[in-house]
Amino acid sequence: MQKISVRPRALSRGRSSDLAVRRTVLSFLLATAAALSQAVEAPSFAALLQQSQANAPQLLEQAANVRAASADARQAGAWLNPTISATAENLGAPRSGGVSQRQDTYTVTQVFELGGKRTARIAAEQRKFAAAGARERQVRLAFAGELAVAYATAEAMQQRRQVADAELGRADDDLRAAQALVKAGREAELRLALARAGVAAAQAAVQSASADAIEALERLSALAGAAEPYTSIGQPFLASVATPRPQPDWRPGDAPALASATAERDAVSAQVQVEQKRWLPDLGVSVGMRKFGWSDDKAATVALTANIPLFDRNQAGIDAAKERATSASMRLEAVRLEAVSQHRSASAQVQAAERRLLAAQQGEAAATEAYRLGRVGYDAGKTALVELLAIRRALSEATALAIEARLARVRALATLSLAQGRNLFGEAP
């Protein structure tokens, strides 16, 4: 009798614990639903990439930099402004024969840059504009890959949450089956405790997966510049990314990083010409009129001015510009070597990701069939609960591996996209 009285209390405590955990999970899910009630479903990746061109802060920043470089290039062609001066001479001087000796002179001076200063300055700013355009292209390609990874991550987290929900449903089914078997005397009380532990673990996995999904969606929303956070991924992307065609005619110059480094080197090299011509004198031409105080007569004045490069020939500035050009050339060579290496490694990673995904899909199919057979055997009393729990864990792990393999493939494609200089996830905007 004592043994019978203890078991109901244990079952009652177990049911109370299950009820408390379920209430916690329900509260968490309700809070999550309330937080996402104002959100919207993310559009397809192609549509989101197109929308990002007008909303993403990263792209807007680069577009502003290009416009600024274009304005600097236009400003470089402007001529120097003329100056006007007025000079009053012989103020307070003694009169000569009662006549004032005052003279007023009005002069307009225009300074002309000699030695090709203006041409060198325009060329330097145009090179800077080209470098800004190359950087923008690199950023746009990198953004497309980053957005693809963020979109794929959000979808993967959403799938993991679905897997966790399915795992919780299977755990509930196992718990009900265990309760029925224990009640019928066909299983020991330990099996019921194991089933409850499995339910608790599945509930914790649901909470963790939900939090990860929310984080991934928030990250995607911020990256795309969305006004409101997205609540879910409605259009499949992970499974729809096509395998890219080989690019046998790829050259290192196709890499946007190398193109950007080349443009930077050219811009710095053009600045050397600017510094070499900076010390050359500027010629000032002055034309004016002089008015005499003792008569109404006027006289024209003409003057030429030029600075004398006696103490400053800008030698240190020229040396500094040459060293910057040397540094840019070395940086270009380093980027070239890195571009070749990155292209080879990215191609290998894509091939490995394709093989990994194929193996993961085969493993997921096998684990699904194993769980189906194990569940049939457990319901028939031929498979132990411990064995069924192990099969169920294997199914969850196989599904998670397949999701991770699809995500790893997208990451590898994003790296290859930037290495090759082409958008592998759709037409570049």
Image: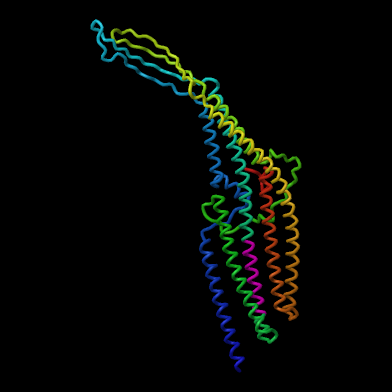
Q: Residue at x 68, y 60 (%)?
A: 403
Q: Position of residue 40 (x, y in %)?
A: 55, 57
* Magenta segment includes 164: yes
Q: Position of residue 206 (x, y in %)?
A: 60, 67
Q: Which sits in the foreground, 418 or 64?
A: 418
Image quarter for residue 404? Answer: bottom right
Image quadrant in which the C terminus is located: top right
What residue range appears in magenta?
158-177
Q: Position of residue 379 (x, y in %)?
A: 72, 79
Position of 20 compared to 337: left or right?
Answer: left
Q: Residue furthest top?
A: 97
Q: Residue at x 57, y 77 (%)?
A: 18
User: Could you tell me how many numbered marks the image carries?
Assistant: 0
Q: Which sits in the foreground, 16 or 308?
A: 308
Q: Position of residue 389 (x, y in %)?
A: 69, 74
Note whether 413 is above or below 131 in the view shown: below
Q: Is residue 259 visible?
A: no
Q: Which sits in the foreground, 331 or 38?
A: 331
Q: Is residue 156 visible?
A: yes
